[in-house]
Image (tube, rainbow, N blue to C red):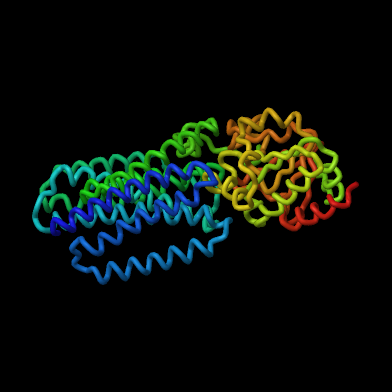
């Protein structure tokens, strides 16, 4: 690399770092999030371009072809994916990032070792770290993707001796990491391979016992691991862009994970290992009572004469793609003088901020969205709560049934409202696979059917109410 190309490369790296930082800062609010995403993407595009132009590459034609192919696949996936599939796409892309970081560190280490050289500690230590957490992030994200895609069950998957297997595998990985750092050139090869394979196995084993209700927290955690893996790869390659951008992703993902765990009143260790501590009998989740079905005319009357209405969205809203109908209903009710708010649970949906993104897409004002702690005190003063596709996050068993698998998880306390109307296709349980006694309470009415169709009919019926 000439002095000129080196100067240009470093200048572009600085611009990229600035764009990434500003881009992440602009992700804080929906009004600036799109431009923030574009700025960060522009920065990465500049870095890729300068890499292809100024940095000597042995197989630049292959790399260019892979770059174009990856861009085509990514663009197609981003433009065609439905909002219902967005969480699993996030998990899939995140896993690809972790796997790529692990492969880069693994390839760099193997290249040095096969030449009979010993990599310096400044390369071997971050290399071991990258392979370890990158492989964990990759396999863990693939299991998360499989659960979200319903290729495997959403309930915790446990088996006998799982704790012992985890502990043994963790000790093996520590031993392999020590041997990779301290062994001779050829003596490090096998421990390095064991480290990569064992870390991939550990990532899958960690996510398998995680239940569906905890999946947003796990996705956030895996995202932070991918960021840390990218940062460590930057140390291996001496790349400042990777170090800064990876650190930002790792730090923000870690903070988000902590905030979500705190909101659920559960430490991250309980999210990851809670399924091991006790196996609940599914019988304790069953509730006894009577289902009270309703119709759009009755619900329209309830809403028209209410003073305050709270809408609680869930994954069913995304499945039905009914966010626009929810917004139209909000506008119609506000024209009647009804106070309409949205109650957002921190883990509603399948990924962090899922409901916020969904409602922002329909141009629901952000000041109408209330977090769980802010909206819970309002339910006792609410005339009607409209639960659209939410299940586990409204389950009162989390508050009053010690035998429930979700006991202790903070919920949206919709059962304290005067009337609760639940829009749902059937009485099937939610992603956590447990019954919801909310559906059998005296003040609850079930409006069965597709949420989009029900809301469209409800809006028409509302216009007929005097």
Which residue is most to the left? 116
Q: Residue at x 25, y 51 (%)?
A: 11
Position in image of residue 433 (x %, y %): 62, 46
Which one is in front, 285 or 56? 56
Where residue 444 sits, quadrant-wise, is top right
Q: Nearer the viewer, residue 353 or 465?
A: 465
Residue, x 41% and y 40% (percent of image)?
Answer: 252
**Is residue 287 shown to the viewer in this render?**
no
How many labels, in total?
Answer: 0
The image shows residue 90 at horizontal and vertical percentages of 47, 53
Left or right: where does residue 180 sit relative to residue 245?
left
Q: Is residue 251 visible?
A: yes
Q: Toward the viewer: 364 or 239?
A: 364
Q: Quadrant of residue 291?
A: top right
The quadrant of the rendering that contains the N terminus is: bottom left
**Vertical relation: 410 (above or below) 129:** above
Q: Residue at x 43, y 36 (%)?
A: 255
On screen, residue 151 above or below 219: below
For residue 377, side relative to residue 358 (left or right): right
- Residue 138: give x, y in percent of width and height: 38, 52
Direction from residue 331 to residue 188 in the image, left or right = left
Name the residue: 80% across, 35% down.
Answer: 307
Residue 130 image position (x, y, % from top left): 28, 47
């Amino acid at each position: 690399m000439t002095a000129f190309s080196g100067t240009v490369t470093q200048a572009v790296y600085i611009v990229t770092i600035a764009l990434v930082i500003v881009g992440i800062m602009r992700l804080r609010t929906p009004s600036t999030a799109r431009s923030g995403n574009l700025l960060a993407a522009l920065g990465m595009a500049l870095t890729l371009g300068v890499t292809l132009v100024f940095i000597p590459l042995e197989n630049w034609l292959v790399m260019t072809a892979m770059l174009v192919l990856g861009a085509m696949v990514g663009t197609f996936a981003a433009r065609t994916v439905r909002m219902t599939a967005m969480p699993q796409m996030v998990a899939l892309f995140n896993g690809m990032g972790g796997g790529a970081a692990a492969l880069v560190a693994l390839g760099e280490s193997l290249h040095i070792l096969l030449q009979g050289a010993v990599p310096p500690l400044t390369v071997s230590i971050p290399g071991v770290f990258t392979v370890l957490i990158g492989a964990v992030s990759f396999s863990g994200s693939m299991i998360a993707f499989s659960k979200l895609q319903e290729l495997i069950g959403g309930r915790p998957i446990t088996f006998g001796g799982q704790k012992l297997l985890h502990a043994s595998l963790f000790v093996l990985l520590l031993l392999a990491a020590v041997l990779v750092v301290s062994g001779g050139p050829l003596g490090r090869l096998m421990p390095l391979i064991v480290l990569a394979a064992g870390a991939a196995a550990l990532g899958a084993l960690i996510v398998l016992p995680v239940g569906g209700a905890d999946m947003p927290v796990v996705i956030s955690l895996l995202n932070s691991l991918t960021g840390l893996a990218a940062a460590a790869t930057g140390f291996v390659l001496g790349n400042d862009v990777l170090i800064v951008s990876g650190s930002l992703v790792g730090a923000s993902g870690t903070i988000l994970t902590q905030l979500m765990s705190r909101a659920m009143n559960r430490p991250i260790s309980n999210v990851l290992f809670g399924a091991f501590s006790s196996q609940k009998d599914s019988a304790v989740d069953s509730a006894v009572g009577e289902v009270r079905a309703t119709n759009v005319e009755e619900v329209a009357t309830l809403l028209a004469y209410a003073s305050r209405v709270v809408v609680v969205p869930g994954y069913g809203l995304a499945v039905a793609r009914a966010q626009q109908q929810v917004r139209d209903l909000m506008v119609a009710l506000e024209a009647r003088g009804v106070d309409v708010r949205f109650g957002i649970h921190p883990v509603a949906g399948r990924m962090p901020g899922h409901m916020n993104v969904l409602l922002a897409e329909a141009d629901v004002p952000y000041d109408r969205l209330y977090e769980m702690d802010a909206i819970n005190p309002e339910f006792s003063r609410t005339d009607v709560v409209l639960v659209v596709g939410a299940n586990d996050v409204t389950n009162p068993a989390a508050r009053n049934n010690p035998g429930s698998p979700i006991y202790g998880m903070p919920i949206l306390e919709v059962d304290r409202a005067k009337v609760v109307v639940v829009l749902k296709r059937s009485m099937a349980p939610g992603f956590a696979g447990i019954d919801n006694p909310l559906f059998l309470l005296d003040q609850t009415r079930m409006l069965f059917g597709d949420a989009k169709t029900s809301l469209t009919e409800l809006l028409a019926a509302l216009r007929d109410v005097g």
